[in-house]
Image (tube, rainbow, N blue to C red):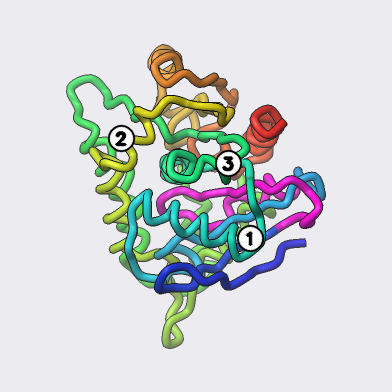
Amino acid sequence: MKALHAIPVAGASLTVGMWGTAEAPAALAIHGISATHMCWNTLARLAGKDLQIIAPDLRGRGRSTDAGGPYGMAAHARDFAAILDELGVARATVVGHSMGAFAALVFAHLYPERVAGVVLVAGGLPIPPPPGARIEDVTEAILAPIEARLAAPVATREAYLEAWKAHPAFTEITGDLREYIDYDLIEREGVLWPSGSLEAIRADGRTLIGDADLSAALAAAPGSVPREFLRAEFGMAVGAPPLYPPDEAASLAQRFALPARTVEGVNHYTIVMGEEGARGVLAALGRVGS
């Protein structure tokens, strides 16, 4: 059973979704650049009472959409520390998806004493640009459809669901995904909008390139915190080329001294928002948190 909590952080309050029981090992789960904490509901269902999953809506997302900056990976890391403090959790295994993996890496670098292990899911390591492209081009290509989705109101919840049915990453709308889609809508003055602040999305997108805190976290020695990188077999859509090709993922894993595994049959989205992907993430949490 999930519970929602409003937890104070510097200058704001963030909505935090929690599953499991306080007696179970804690897992801090960090969503991607335009997602919400509900991307973890499949993982939570599979984990049951074996994990206490603590999953915030980051500043500018979900029910934290109106929480303003500061943004950036270090600012999010400070929010995570405040959330764990408020909940009385001294130490947690940390899992981050996509941009959330970069935030997880920075949190582990700035607060190593709070981290039992780290799972980087389809993110956290530098994304290799295709031949002839720049990393800025990759970032812009990822952000463009997100910005288009957030820029327009939605006529009805049914219309928003129909739009998601055309998403190239999903072959079916499962019950878990339907709950995610429904949660993603917020109402303002009688008008439905996809949750998420364009300001937050753009600000965080900029910090993924050449950010000092992220660069320091990547350059730091792994230390005693167990880490693992999970890559999706496919990219942003069913059957699409992966963001991390196998050879380059292996090279990055060697460069940053951490194990890398591939979750077969999933893409950048279904590695957390599909059952097969969530099982892979749950297994990784067991390995680094043991």
Q: Nearer the viewer, residue 218 or 260?
A: 218
Stretch of the chain drawn in magenta = 19-45
Q: Secondary structure at mark 3?
A: strand
Residue highlighted by disc 1:
179
- What residue did someone put label 2 on? 215
Q: Nearer the viewer, residue 220 or 63?
A: 220
Amino acid type assigned to the residue bearing label 3 in the image: Val
Toward which corner of the image does residue 214 lie, by quadrant?
top left
Q: CA distance from mark 2 to mark 1?
A: 36 Å
Q: CA distance from mark 2 to mark 3?
A: 19 Å
Which residue, as the protein is rendered here, is positioned at the far front? 113
Label 1 sits on what residue type?
Glu
Residue at image position (68%, 34%) is 289
Q: Helix, strand or loop at disc 1?
A: helix
Please state if 25 lies on the left or on the right of 120 as rendered. right
| Residue where numbered disc 3 is placed | 115
